[in-house]
Image: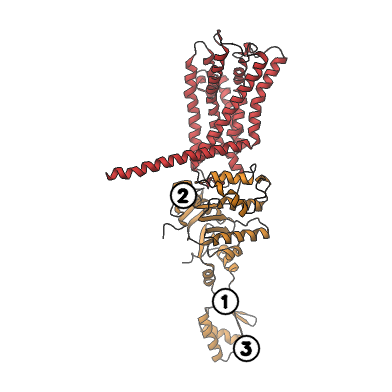
Chain colours: A red, B orange
């Protein structure tokens, strides 16, 4: 009887501290977003994410020809729905990795730069809560960039070429409404490898304490993966490169859906997300905060 | 030692490579103390404070703040504790008010309701909506105190709070610390300025090259320094001989004066002996070693004496 009674407050305490940790993380998350809103780099990143598809559509409206060598490229003027897919395909090489790195590489290093890490770590928030809040804010920004890019591309292209059925990668047409669902699924799938890039940026941001170095190195990491994937003789590892997961959505646009690249993207991306995050977390939790 | 002392650090060591920045430091700050942590720049004051606040891990030793260990418990151990190390730092792109609101949300429970009151207290209410990037050093310093006060702390850790301030700013800052101490907040304040510590603190620890060379009250420190005396007589040569005969070691003959160190009891005996020896006393003056001299002795001499018991 006594053991049960003794256990009860323990369980209760655990539940309470669990709830406190969640609330703490939510508060950090809120302020990380507010801080992003007050910083120029956020607007630089999101602005670029909006400008690229707009410029792309304008160029295609005023010039003939098109991106014939990428999937859906040939049908770009057939329906406004093709543009977001094509833009995502192009932006996977360095555009979105750079936009992602801009914030992910700064999210911890920016604190070091302003020497504010000691300011926030001497309040009541555990380092784990601070880390989780920063991670969530980074993912939110990254998702926002992808979403904005697709939305601006879709709206601009629909204005130019209309909301019409899309030619799938297997040939048959897909209705406009269904294509929109496919686009949303694509965004979710596409976000996974991008969060992998963000996780790597977060690791460098934590480890280097230098925002510029972390941003540049994260971009180099993304480019290096692309390069490895483009080299002859790397066919065997190619499907397991993070960079390759950016085209997993091709499977969605086949009739019927090809699930193999999609399931692979799920677990490969998960590994690329988990490994750097675990390392970043351990460094952040244990590190000496001196001079930052 | 009571476990609930505001600060109880034992055997703190922080090594960077081979070099110890802090070397077996013991610190005890009791309730109501305004404790001065005194030492030249680079002596290990900031490193010690960082360890107290859980920002860096000690290589060895234990810390308890009101009985809770910041190394084990992390930020939770800082319940009732606030302060800053080095200059307080804020997000330059947010206003002072927003910086405080952010920090208030980082407190448990949130201290949002106190933001305006604290801004008022540190006289930044008018500038509260300006970006911190445009604040002067003194304003940031005041905002730092304000950020600490949000937490309604029982223990305030301040790292050289007057450094870089102009004389008026220094005076105001000391006035603020005195007022907070008057409200019952225990303060641990590091400084390289003896006068500041003398002015504010009831207890001090003096640190030199990572080691505590003195801990106690400044009054006791003065006593350990002993007293030196200057004696002018009608016959310096005989006076010297009498002094030596009375167990005064190494009296120093300077012009017509005799200088020596001795306690009051010995000096009283000496005056009687001089009279009996027909030596007239023209002047007898006691030179108390100034705190400044003692401080410099403690922090600059090559071999530090063992810490006073």
Q: Earlier in the sequence, mark 2 or mark 1?
A: 2
Mark 2: give few (<14), some (14-19) or many (20+) Cα within 10 Å: many
On the same chain, marks 2 and 1? The answer is: yes
Using the image, name the chain to which the residue with label 1 belongs: B
Q: Residue furthest left?
A: A1
Query: In front: mark 2 or mark 3?
Result: 2
The front one of B233 and B308 is B308
**Cα separation between marks 2 and 1:** 48 Å
- Residue B41 in picture, x, y percent from top left: 59, 57
Viewer-nearest of labels 2 and 1?
Answer: 2
Vertical placement of B202 versus B57: above or below?
A: below
Identify residue for label 1. Answer: B228
Question: SS class of the residue under badge 3?
Answer: loop
The residue that disc 2 covers is B77
| Circle nearer the N terminus (2, 3) | 2
State whether residue A217 appears in this view: yes
Q: Secondary structure at mark 2?
A: helix
Vertical comparison of A245 with A210: above or below? above
Query: Do discs 1 and 3 belong to a common subunit?
Result: yes
- How packed mark 3 is, by other alpha carbons closer than 10 Å (few <14, some 14-19, many 20 or more), is some
């Amino acid at each position: 009887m006594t053991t049960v009674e003794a256990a009860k407050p323990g369980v209760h305490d655990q539940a309470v501290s669990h709830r406190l940790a969640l609330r703490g993380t939510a508060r950090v998350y809120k302020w990380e977003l507010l801080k992003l809103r007050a910083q120029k780099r956020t607007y630089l990143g999101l602005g670029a994410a909006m400008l690229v598809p707009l410029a792309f559509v304008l160029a295609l409206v005023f010039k003939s020809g098109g991106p014939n060598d990428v999937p859906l490229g040939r049908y770009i003027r057939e329906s406004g729905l093709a543009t977001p897919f094509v833009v995502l395909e192009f932006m996977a090489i360095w555009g979105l990795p750079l936009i992602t790195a801009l914030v992910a590489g700064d999210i911890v290093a920016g604190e070091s730069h302003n020497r504010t890490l000691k300011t926030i770590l001497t309040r009541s928030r555990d380092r784990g809560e601070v880390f989780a809040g920063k991670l969530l804010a980074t993912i939110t920004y990254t998702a926002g960039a992808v979403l904005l890019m697709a939305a601006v591309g879709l709206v601009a292209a629909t204005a130019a070429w209309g909301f019409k059925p899309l030619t799938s990668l297997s040939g048959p047409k897909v209705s406009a409404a269904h294509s929109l669902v496919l686009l949303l699924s694509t965004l979710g799938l596409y976000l996974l490898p991008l969060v992998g890039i963000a996780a790597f940026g977060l690791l460098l941001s934590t480890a280097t304490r230098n925002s510029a170095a972390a941003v540049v190195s994260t971009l180099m990491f993304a480019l290096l993966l692309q390069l490895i994937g483009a080299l002859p003789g790397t066919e065997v590892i190619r499907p397991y490169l993070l960079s390759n997961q950016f085209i997993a959505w091709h499977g969605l646009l086949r009739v019927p859906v090809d699930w193999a690249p999609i399931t692979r993207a799920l677990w490969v991306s998960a590994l690329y997300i988990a490994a750097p995050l675990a390392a970043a977390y351990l460094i952040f939790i244990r590190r000496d905060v001196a001079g930052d | 030692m009571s476990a609930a002392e505001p600060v109880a650090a034992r055997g703190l060591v922080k090594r960077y490579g081979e070099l110890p920045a802090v070397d077996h430091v013991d610190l005890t700050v009791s309730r109501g103390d305004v404790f001065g942590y005194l030492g030249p720049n680079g002596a290990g004051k900031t490193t010690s404070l960082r360890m107290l606040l859980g920002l860096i891990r000690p290589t060895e030793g234990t810390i308890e703040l009101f009985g809770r260990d910041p190394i084990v418990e992390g930020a939770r151990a800082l319940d009732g504790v606030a302060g800053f190390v080095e200059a307080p730092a804020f997000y330059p792109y947010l206003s002072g008010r927003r910086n405080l609101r952010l920090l208030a949300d980082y407190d448990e429970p949130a201290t949002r309701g106190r933001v305006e009151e604290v801004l008022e207290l540190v006289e930044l209410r008018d500038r509260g909506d300006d970006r911190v990037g445009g604040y002067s050093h003194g304003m940031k310093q005041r905002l730092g105190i304000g950020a600490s006060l949000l937490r309604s702390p029982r223990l305030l850790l301040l790292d050289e709070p007057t450094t870089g301030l102009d004389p008026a700013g220094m005076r105001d800052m000391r006035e603020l610390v005195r007022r907070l101490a008057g409200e019952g907040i225990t303060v641990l304040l590091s400084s390289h300025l003896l006068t500041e510590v003398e002015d504010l603190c009831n207890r001090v620890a003096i640190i030199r090259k990572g080691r505590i060379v003195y801990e106690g009250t400044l009054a006791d420190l003065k006593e350990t320094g002993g007293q030196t005396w200057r004696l002018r007589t009608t016959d310096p040569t005989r006076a010297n001989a009498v002094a030596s005969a009375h167990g005064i070691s190494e009296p120093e003959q300077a012009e017509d004066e005799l200088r020596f160190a001795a306690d009051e009891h010995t000096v009283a005996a000496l005056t009687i002996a001089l009279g009996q020896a027909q030596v007239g006393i023209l002047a007898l003056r006691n030179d108390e070693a100034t705190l400044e001299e003692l401080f410099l002795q403690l922090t600059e001499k090559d071999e530090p004496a063992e810490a006073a018991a």
